[in-house]
Amino acid sequence: MAYLVISNDEQFVAMMTSLLHGDVMQCLQVEEVLSQKYVKAQLIIWHEPHPTSKTLMHCEQLFQRHIPILYFTVDMTNAVERIIPFVFDFFIMPYNTLYITAKIQTAMQYSLSMKALQQQTRFLEKDLQTAKNVQKSALTPSLYKKNIQVDGFYVTSHVLGGDMYCWFEVSEHQTAIILYDVMGHGVASSLVTMSIRSLLRGMMTRLADPNLVVQELNRHINELYKDEYMDSYLVTAIYLLVDTEANTLQYVNAGHPTGYIFNEHGACIELKANAPILGLLPTLKIQKTELPLHDYARIVLYTDGLQQEDESVEPKQFLPYIAQSNVADLRNFVENQQLANMQQLDDISLVFITVST
């Protein structure tokens, strides 16, 4: 064990050395400790006979080192009362060595517990970052074809979330696109998100039709998580099937935020919800909506993390971003909204699709 004694009183240092079992380091002034980037000690013993105007500030700064502090003084002043939140314990002369010994042992047990907790926290943070990276790696890369371009943007929250998007070529002229959001946060929602993602390639390329894909997805969600010991999960999703030969867009919006289709003049068609949230009912009767596509269309999809508090997302927010290339407009929107730098509680996902027929 390593101890740091802050004192210029050799008699006090000698007393502490006789009570401590381990390596004892000494600093004459607290400023010496504060100037060091790292303190290799499990316990700080600070002897300051007469508190000064800087005592409280110094205590706050030492407290940030996450090392327990035992504070020794002569005067019981208001300054001592103010430092109580920042020290493990304090002592006023005359000192009781038996009581001090007991407090040292308690403080060391606390210090070791805190060190173990900090190490565990670092491991968990590393695992959390790995899980975030795995989730990001499952996002489909951009798609660029003659008549359709698809780009996505995803920024994770400080915890694992439930957003995911992907798209697949069903045929030479058909592209299937889905954006979904598992409600909730944390490891459980992320695992549900990834388990759904593993089903989608086969489901979307085999079934393609929005009615069939969303019905099958709902069935899987109910089947996977119907165990009585597992929580049920609800999923919002918007699924599109774009056909550049028939110049049509078919979609099902299962309780997801409204998507938008803009033409080259800025006129907007809303892709409103036309089906219940997935996982709510074991079977769904779904009726897809089919829309014609003329010449040029910019389709914008997003998750509810884009919404600020109770404010809804309006089409006018996207109007400045429908004239350039698909990826350029998406990048400009992200930069202008400062989405990449936000510290938000929910994931944010955006999908921009450009169809030119």
Image: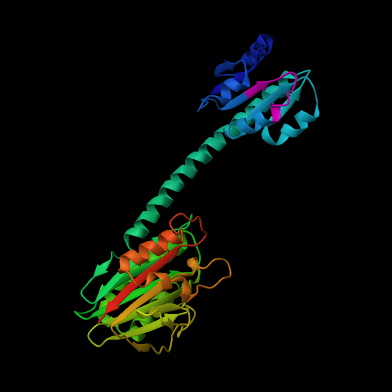
Q: Is residue 212 left or right of residue 257?
A: left
Q: Nearer the viewer, residue 223 or 10?
A: 10
- Residue 239 visible (yes or no): yes
- Report the residue at 48% width, 56% height from top: 342
What range is drawn magenta here?
45-56
Taking the spot 38% from the left edge, 79% from the top edge, the residue there is 262
- Name the residue rendered at 61%, 19% in the picture: 5
Residue 257 in sight here: no
Quadrant assignment, res 15: top right
Q: Nearer the viewer, residue 149 or 33?
A: 149
Residue 111's image quarter?
A: top right
As drawn, 65 above or below 315: above
Judge by depth and name the residue closer to the eye, 180 or 281. Answer: 180
Q: Is residue 191 magenta?
A: no
Quadrant the C terminus occupies: bottom left
**Residue 129 pos. (x, y %):** 41, 51
Q: Position of residue 22 (x, y in %)?
A: 55, 19
Q: In the image, residue 121 lies at what x, y percent?
A: 49, 44
Nearer to the camera, 123 or 50: 50
